[in-house]
Image (cartoon, rainbow, N blue to C red):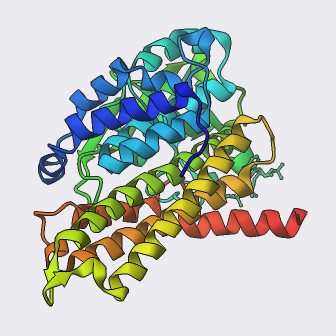
């Protein structure tokens, strides 16, 4: 399928493909089994300037857009979702600084994040506030020139590995979601500790940890935007990052489809390759059609985000929900085509199926995406 990409866009894919084929695929099963964070691969990704895609040129980025980020994320996900998640989660972590940070914050933090020398993480979720992002309990109380942060963030991707954290906390709980604010917290600050690394079903090589704040004193300059803007900053960030979750689904499903197709050609039953059976052919046809449909929706959503259009929530949520549901189905079908072998760890498709599940859960469950789509539809129509 030709998407009429520019030379630069094709180059992004080619660079990611080389990393995927040479560095990721040979070790992905081991990273998954041992739950090893892919630090070396992320250094390679940084060295190839791929974190710069997210970041404006004034801050040592390449000033491209979410579309280019989606191309990179898709290709990395084709190889391994843990690697792609760790890459994309850093972008999610520093997007609030790009969207609402002041000049000093951008100059201080973005160049190091653009080079990949430092990673970022996004700290919104809490033990009792997942889908209900406005229900966070972490408190930030202003005392003189500081905010004192107390509370716990849960299931934070890149937790412990990242150096820069964007953290959402209540500065005025009486105001509900309008009382939330966003802050920049750095690893190593007094009163900031990490909980245990979670033992997960999928994306096992990615790092997921609790962030624990115990009287953590932040300079007042570390607030992003103004007090009370936190919920809005979180929503704007997620509106921009969700197409990249869709791209993770497209890449992961593409990888599973390629494995299933190759296997169907060589696996013989009843004296012929299983790709000659209509039951298998139709599965392959449906898988390929679904991947392509999702890719079109994701690319379109990313381009609309990059156009600067303000009203992007519905389309962004559609791209995330469609591509992640598709990835769950396609990876499950890939296991089915492999049959008993697909269920074994010798082949990559069982891991792909385990990895796919998180896409329906993180950055807003697919039930929340459907709420966002339906509410917008009912309010605004077409
Ligand atoms: N862009 C801009 N403004 C938005 C917005 C968006 N995408 N979504 C909501 N708002 C505004 C609303 O317009 C409303 O403004 P007013 O107070 O001026 O009316 C305000 O924010 C509160 O919105 P709402 O009442 O819809 O908030 P809810 O508490 O009902 O929550 C959802 C809305 C469910 C959409 C939100 O909590 C959400 O996205 N949850 C999922 C969070 C998530 O993705 N978690 C994953 C962890 S992060 S990896």
In the shown orientation, is residue 128 left or right of residue 380? Answer: left
The answer to whether one can see residue 336 in this image is no
**Nearer the observer, 244 or 226:** 244
The answer to whether one can see residue 15 in this image is yes
Q: Residue at x 28, y 43 (%)?
A: 195
In the shown orientation, is residue 368 left or right of residue 125? Answer: right
**Nearer the observer, 214 or 101:** 101
- Image mark count: 0
Q: Residue at x 63, y 63 (%)?
A: 369
Q: Is residue 10 above or below residue 235?
A: above
Q: Quadrant of residue 181?
A: top right
Screen quadrant of the C terminus: bottom right
Indicate the position of residue 96 as horizontal and vertical percent values: 60, 31
Q: Residue furthest bottom?
A: 270
Q: Is residue 199 above or below residue 186?
A: below
**Nearer the observer, 176 or 250:** 250
Q: Residue at x 20, y 60 (%)?
A: 348
Indicate the position of residue 147 as horizontal and vertical percent values: 56, 25
Q: Quadrant of residue 164?
A: top left
Indicate the position of residue 197 as horizontal and vertical percent values: 24, 46
Q: Residue at x 52, y 57 (%)?
A: 129
Indicate the position of residue 250 as horizontal and vertical percent values: 47, 56
In the shown orientation, is residue 250 left or right of residue 131? Answer: left
**Nearer the observer, 220 or 205:** 205
């Amino acid at each position: 399928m030709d998407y009429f990409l520019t030379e630069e866009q094709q180059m992004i894919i080619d660079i990611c493909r080389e990393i995927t084929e040479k560095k990721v695929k040979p070790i992905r099963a081991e990273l998954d089994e041992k739950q090893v964070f892919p630090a070396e691969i992320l250094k390679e990704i940084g060295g190839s300037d791929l974190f710069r895609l997210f970041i404006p040129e004034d801050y040592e980025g390449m000033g491209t857009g979410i579309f280019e980020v989606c191309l990179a994320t898709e290709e990395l996900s084709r190889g391994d979702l843990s690697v792609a998640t760790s890459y994309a989660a850093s972008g999610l972590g520093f997007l609030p600084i790009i969207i609402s940070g002041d000049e000093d914050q951008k100059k201080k933090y973005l160049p190091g994040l653009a080079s990949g020398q430092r990673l970022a993480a996004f700290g919104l979720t809490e033990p009792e506030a997942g889908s209900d992002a406005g229900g966070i309990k972490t408190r930030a109380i202003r005392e003189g020139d500081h905010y004192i942060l107390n509370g716990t963030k849960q299931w934070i991707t890149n937790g412990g590995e990242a150096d820069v954290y964007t953290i959402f906390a209540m500065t005025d709980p009486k105001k509900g979601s309008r009382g939330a604010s966003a802050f920049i917290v750095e690893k190593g600050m007094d009163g900031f500790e990490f909980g245990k690394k979670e033992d997960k079903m999928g994306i096992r090589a990615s790092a997921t940890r609790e962030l624990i704040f115990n009287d953590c004193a932040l300079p007042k300059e570390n607030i992003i935007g103004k007090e009370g803007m936190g919920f809005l900053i979180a929503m704007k960030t997620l509106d921009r990052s969700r197409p990249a979750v869709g791209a993770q689904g497209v890449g992961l499903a593409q990888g599973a489809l390629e494995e299933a197709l190759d296997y169907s050609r060589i696996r013989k039953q009843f004296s012929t390759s299983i790709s000659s059976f209509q039951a298998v052919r139709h599965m392959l046809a449906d898988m390929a059609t679904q991947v392509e449909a999702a890719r079109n929706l994701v690319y379109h959503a990313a381009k609309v985000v990059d156009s600067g259009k303000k009203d992007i929530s519905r389309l962004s949520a559609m791209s995330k929900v469609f591509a992640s549901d598709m990835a769950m189905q396609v990876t499950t079908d890939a296991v089915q085509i492999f049959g008993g072998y697909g269920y074994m760890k010798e082949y990559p498709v069982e891991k792909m199926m385990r990895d796919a599940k998180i896409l329906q859960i993180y950055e807003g469950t697919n039930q929340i995406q459907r709420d966002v789509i339906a509410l917008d539809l009912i309010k605004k129509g077409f």
